[in-house]
Image (cartoon, helix red, strand yellow):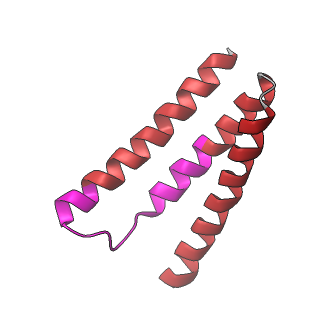
Amino acid sequence: MIEIIGWASSLILLATLIKQVYKQWKDGTSEGISKWLFIGQLAASIGFTTYSYLVGSWVFMVTNALLTINNIIGIFLYFYFKR
């Protein structure tokens, strides 16, 4: 069960990054970053933080906790500047 959390989080993160790269490639620009990038990364970061805690990996737990904070800031800024 613990490994499922790690793999599911990896898949969420990869899916959001691949979707964003495809959008940038298709549009030929990096402008207009999708809110789903931040939302998917936030979900993955929370999953990775939980996974890292459950397997006792403090390095990855702290790293992913910081990524979670970063994604929350990214979501905030996305909606702040979108208004």
Compared to 33, does 7 lie above or below? Answer: above
Percent across and percent down for residue 32 are 35, 72
Compared to 21, does 28 lie above or below? Answer: below
In what quadrant of the picture does the N terminus appear? Answer: top right
Give the camera-side residue of 47 and 57. 57
Residue name at image x 33 percent, y 49 percent? 19
Percent across and percent down for residue 25 are 21, 58
Q: Residue furthest front?
A: 59
Query: Which stretch is magenta?
Result: 23-44
Residue name at image x 77 percent, y 44 percent? 62
Q: What count of labels does the image hold? A: 0
Compared to 51, does 32 lie above or below? Answer: below
Residue name at image x 55 percent, y 49 percent? 41
Is residue 37 part of the magenta span, yes or no?
yes
Which secondary structure dominates the residues rendered in magenta? Answer: helix
Could you tell whether 55 is left or right of 77 in the image?
A: right
Residue name at image x 49 percent, y 38 percent? 12
Residue 50 sits in quarter: top right
Could you tell whether 83 is left or right of 45 in the image?
A: left
Compared to 28, does 10 lie above or below? Answer: above
Is residue 38 part of the magenta span, yes or no?
yes
Percent across and percent down for residue 60 are 71, 37
Could you tell whether 4 is left or right of 61 in the image?
A: left
